[in-house]
Amino acid sequence: MPVGDHVDSLATVLDLVRSGTARTRPEIGRRSGLGRTVVTQRVNQLTACGLLEEGALGPSSGGRAPRELRFRAQAGVILAAELGATGISVGVTDLTGTVLAEHTEGHDIAAGPDPVLDRVEQIFDELLDQVRTELAAPDLAVWGVGIGLPGPVEFATGRPSAPPIMPGWDGYPVRERLARRYDTPVWVDNEVNTMALGELRAGSARGQRDILYVKIGTGIGAGLVSGGTLHRGSQGCAGDIGHAAASDEDDVVCRCGNTGCLEAYAGGAALARDGLAAAKQGRSPFLAEVLASTGTVTAADVSRAAQSGDRTSVELLTRAGRLIGSLLATLVSFYNPALVVIGGGVSRAGDLLLAAVRETVYRRSLPLATRELRITRSTLSNRAGLVGAAFMVIDELFTPERLARWVDRGSPAGDPSLVTVPLREPVL
């Protein structure tokens, strides 16, 4: 088992090749500052462990052309899932986070942990069989499992903590269940954190270091990336802006039990509630027709109505955008991100909501905080949480401390206890 400086340099070499930053031994040396002998030793070890392989000859700088190195992205796979309030997205990725197979379907998180996770495991198994068949690799190992949940999660234990919309989930041992099922390390986080991580690694925030990801769906939440690292807070609940106070009124009770919460006025459930009321009261002919034909009104119906010029629906979306923008303006002035990414189902309600958010943020934030600020819609859309759940696992597996535990055997599969390996505090 490599230790100390050895594992640090080993992880550095592997990260450079995994990320595509360096493709040859000379490039690794230039990027890392490591000597030629050390680079050669670490590359040889990683090759012997099955993590790297030789590729084609690279460009020559005058002498002998160097051999390019490749990370063996399909040495194993990651099982990843994002569980939302009303749907689940499940997938299998390679070790670079590339999705190899995926499936999305409607499912009520309030059904409870056993039926929901039973279904997730069933889809995992089906997709895993599919990938193994397509790659002609029947023994392809599961290197880790990543799950995003629509509620507060204590990251250290992988357990939900008093989630407002998840009856029966409080304290449920999600990590332990999946670790037993797949005999591999498992990480569990809030779905908005996985969405933020997905955008950071493979979406519109790629290459950024300070971003704010905001999900506007059934509920509202935020993921915070600081210095290129996801900020979870002491217990893992940083970014829970949906339950920040947006009003002093006590006429609307949020699903968390409090009044005045942002998502109780601006989330998808709130838009559906207010749209239904508008339909029943005759204030929206468009929504009244929807109600008559379907028996209900959804946030998507409000969006379609607004795009059709329905005045009441335009007012509902504009009001929601301004409420969200007001809270984000405070966060932008406080945190000063370079980029705000807006995602979630309601964010795809056309440009009206996004325009209201932007106008309010730029008007209410400090000029210096918004001088170079960009506010954009998610490019990964409904795939962000799935991709981010995979990257959560990948990032954790390849930390130097964990890499030292499994690199000699070439795979972390079969070692669920890797999640308990303590990590060194970063040097400030």
Image: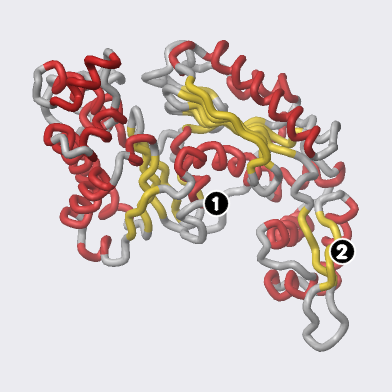
Q: Which residue is mark 2?
A: 41
Residue 120 in the figure: left or right of residue 356? right
Q: Front-most of 151 and 388?
A: 388
Report the residue at 74% width, 36% height from top. 143
Is residue 383 shown above or below 163?
A: below
Q: Disc 2, disc 1: CB below 8 Å?
A: no
First-in-chain label (2 vs 1): 2
Residue 5 appears at what percent x and percent y? Answer: 75, 59
SS state under label 2: helix
Name the residue located 31 percent from the left edge and 61 percent from the top edge.
373
- Asked if one can make out residue 419 in the rendered structure from this viewpoint, the answer is no
Crowd around label 1: few <14 · some 14–19 · many ≥20 (10 Å): some
Residue 10 vs residue 319, the one in the foreground: 319
Q: Which residue is at the far bottom? A: 62
Q: Residue at x 39, y 37 (%)?
A: 344
Q: Nearer the viewer, mark 2 or mark 1?
A: 1
Report x, y in % for residue 242.
30, 32
Say if residue 342 shows up in the picture: yes
In the displayed structure image, the side of residue 114 where residue 337 appears, left or right: left
The residue located at (35%, 53%) in the rendering is: 376
Callout 1 amino acid? Ala
Q: CA distance from mark 2 to mark 1?
A: 31 Å
Q: Position of residue 194 (x, y in %)?
A: 51, 39
In this image, 307 relative to 138: left or right? Answer: left
Question: In the rendering, at what x and y percent does residue 103 appear?
Answer: 59, 29
The dot on residue 202 is: 1
Q: Which mark is residue 279?
A: none
Q: Secondary structure at mark 1?
A: helix
Q: Is residue 338 above or below residue 383?
A: below
Q: Is residue 263 above or below residue 174?
A: below
